[in-house]
Image (cartoon, grey):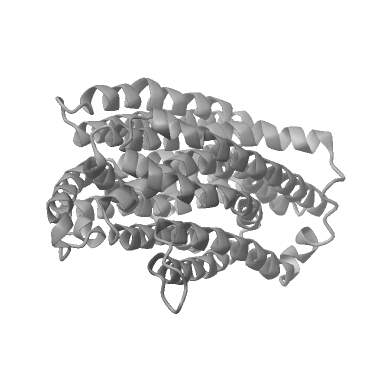
Amino acid sequence: MQLKDYTKEFKYNWQLAAPVMLGMLGHSFVSFVDNVMVGQLGTAELAAVSLGNSFMFIAMSLGIGFSTAITPLTAEADAEQNFKSGKSAFKHGLFLCTVLGVLLFLLVFFAKPLMYYMKQPDEVVALAIPYLDLVAFSLIPLIVFQAFKQFSDGMSMTRYPMYATLLGNIANVVLNYVLIFGKFGFPELGIVGAAYGTLASRFIMVWFIWYLLKGKEKSKAFVTHIKIFVLDTLMLKKIINLGMPSAMQMFFEVAIFTAAIWLSGTLGKNPQAANQIALNLSSMTFMVAMGLSVAAMIRVGNQKGLQKYFELRRIAFSIFLFGILFAISFAILFFSFKNQLPKLYVDFKDFKNLVDNTEVVSIASKLLIAAAIFQISDSVQVIMLGALRGLQDVKIPTLITFISYWLVGFPVSWFLGKEDAYGSFGIWLGLLAGLTTAAILLYIRFNYLTKKLILSNN
């Protein structure tokens, strides 16, 4: 097969992936704005948001990972033009996501005391707890939004979640500015103001995506007249069987990045703040790969519904190639601007905290070298996961992610991340090891399954 057989798919892949990327980049951009605004208050406040969000990342990974079960089922039903099956997948997915959102809120809310046992700086914990109270409640609208988003993606209507996310982001930025710094007569709430902004914006996103989908002919019948408590046990089991392994896949990956936050916290508030900067920057480039992962899930799900397995493999590899090209570009960007990018997060005019801020930037610039190197691994592993979800293959990939991140990556982070070893940079070498292992093993799995499908269909 020639290169043009893959590159000719780039345009449609981009049309599907770009709205998802922009929506996800919007999430990261809000986190970026939060960090920049909170960073003006001081390094302790920045570390507190990092610590609070580390609990949120774990809960969000379970909720968002679970919700991805809706996309391949909807994409398959859409290709088969089976309305009943598509509406059933969405309704049951929405019900399960709502229940999961409530459970995750309760889990995070009651897990707060763990902060006192994690060897984190006392001033950071004191600031993080009131922030986490409000942000934890925002998990409920966020996971409900994810159900609508994954349904919309499965219908190849990827623009509408993007519009809802952008509106939510605008609301978040405005509310953050007003409430963090006490503008226009509002009280100055500091990092608790950032939490209020996040909570309000997530309710706005749910309302707006429902409003958009209700207004479109293709999706109106799916999102109206939903008998949410009339449930089919078989469909519930199908979504749970797809959703739980997908949730665990995302959990294993996010948990190792969260462990990096906690490990860096044991080194002090400055390494933790630096870790937050590098993590926020690398998460923005990861969202581009996530957009392509969703495109892979949709297109592989469509081709599976049509039983065109040779096309399925060709299309998946075109997305894979597209992702590598993006990853190389981001790696070059991080290498080239590793000293400049961290300076966006701290205030060098604040002479009181100048020594702390200088140290934070110095550590973060080193971490961006590791982030640059793992761009390709990160891109490959997440696109391969999306393609495998499109095939509805979730159990073996879950095992692969566990082995990669927790049997390979975490031990490296633990041993090399100690103060008398490589410190923060050692923690990120563990992330690099985990992502690279996952990329290789998931690629082997996808390659094996697609060849098997093509052979069995001939």
Instruction: Please state the horizontal and vertical placement of residue 351, each as a whole percent of the image.
Output: 13, 61
Which corner quadrant of the image does residue 83 belong to? bottom right
Residue at 20 percent across and 47 percent down: it is 364
Q: Quadrant of the C terminus?
A: top right
Quick check: can you spot residue 83? yes
Quick check: can you spot residue 308? no
Residue at 71 percent across and 70 percent down: it is 216
Looking at the image, residue 27 sits to the left or right of residue 424; the answer is right
Instruction: Please state the horizontal and vertical placement of residue 388, each as a whole percent of the image.
Output: 53, 37
Which corner quadrant of the image does residue 194 belong to? bottom left
Instruction: Please state the horizontal and vertical placement of residue 183, each as a whole percent of the image.
Output: 41, 75
Residue at 41 percent across and 71 percent down: it is 182
Which corner quadrant of the image does residue 347 belong to? bottom left
Task: Identify which residue, 276 or 431, lies in the foreground.
Answer: 276
Task: Identify which residue, 43 or 251, lies in the foreground.
Answer: 43
Looking at the image, residue 359 sits to the left or right of residue 104; the answer is left
Determine whether 358 is above or below 214 in the image: above
Looking at the image, residue 172 sits to the left or right of residue 367; the answer is right
- In this figure, what is the number of numbered marks? 0
Q: Quadrant of the N terminus?
A: top left
Task: Identify which residue, 385 or 180, lies in the foreground.
Answer: 180
Q: Residue furthest bottom?
A: 184
Instruction: Please state the horizontal and vertical placement of residue 6, each as a whole percent of the image.
Output: 42, 52
